[in-house]
Image (spheres, rainbow, N blue to C red):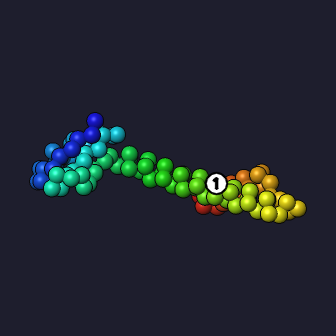
């Protein structure tokens, strides 16, 4: 469950930090409005990994869209979906190294 507390509670930061649990961040308010979130480090790293994965997927879909447009305009030199997949896998392997 999300906990919402005023930022002034940070004076007793050890109490606030003890409230932070996986999948249950503490939301801090400033002047009555949500302003900050404190979350579990493992959860934060999971979120970063998901964002990176989503960005790679978006890049793949953008390339697929470009391929489809190219194929419509240049039917004699069409690029196959399997070629695009191979290129994408190679780029992902290179980025891991």
Q: How many marks?
A: 1
Q: Quarter-wise, where is residue 71 in the image?
A: bottom right
- Residue 35, given in percent of the width and then of the height, sits at 24, 55
Q: Check the image and name the residue furthest to the front.
A: 73
* Residue underneath mark 1: 61
Q: Residue 6 appears at what percent x and percent y?
A: 15, 50
* Horizontal side, residue 43 vs residue 26: left or right: right
Q: Nearer the viewer, residue 32 or 39?
A: 32
Quadrant in the picture for the N terminus: top left
Residue extending farthest to the top is 1
Q: Residue at x 25, y 45 (%)?
A: 26
Instruction: Report whether residue 31 is seen.
Output: yes
Q: Residues within 10 Å of mark 1 (few under 14, many from 20)?
A: few
* Residue at screen point 21% across, 53% down: 33
Spot occupied by residue 62 in the image (x, y as percentages of width and height): 63, 58
| Residue occupying the point 18% across, 56% down | 30
Query: For the C terminus, which image quadrant?
Result: bottom right
Judged from the image, the secondary structure of the residue bearing numbered disc 1 is helix
Q: Residue at x 27, y 40 (%)?
A: 2
* Residue 10 seen in the figure: no
């Amino acid at each position: 469950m999300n906990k919402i507390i005023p930022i002034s509670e940070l004076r007793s930061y050890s109490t606030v930090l003890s409230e932070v649990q996986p999948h249950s961040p503490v939301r801090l308010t400033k002047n009555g409005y949500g302003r900050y979130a404190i979350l579990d480090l493992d959860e934060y790293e999971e979120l970063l990994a998901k964002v990176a994965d989503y960005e790679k997927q978006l890049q793949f879909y953008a390339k697929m869209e470009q391929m489809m447009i190219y194929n419509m305009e240049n039917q004699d030199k069409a690029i196959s979906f399997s070629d695009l997949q191979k290129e994408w896998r190679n780029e992902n392997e290179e980025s891991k190294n």
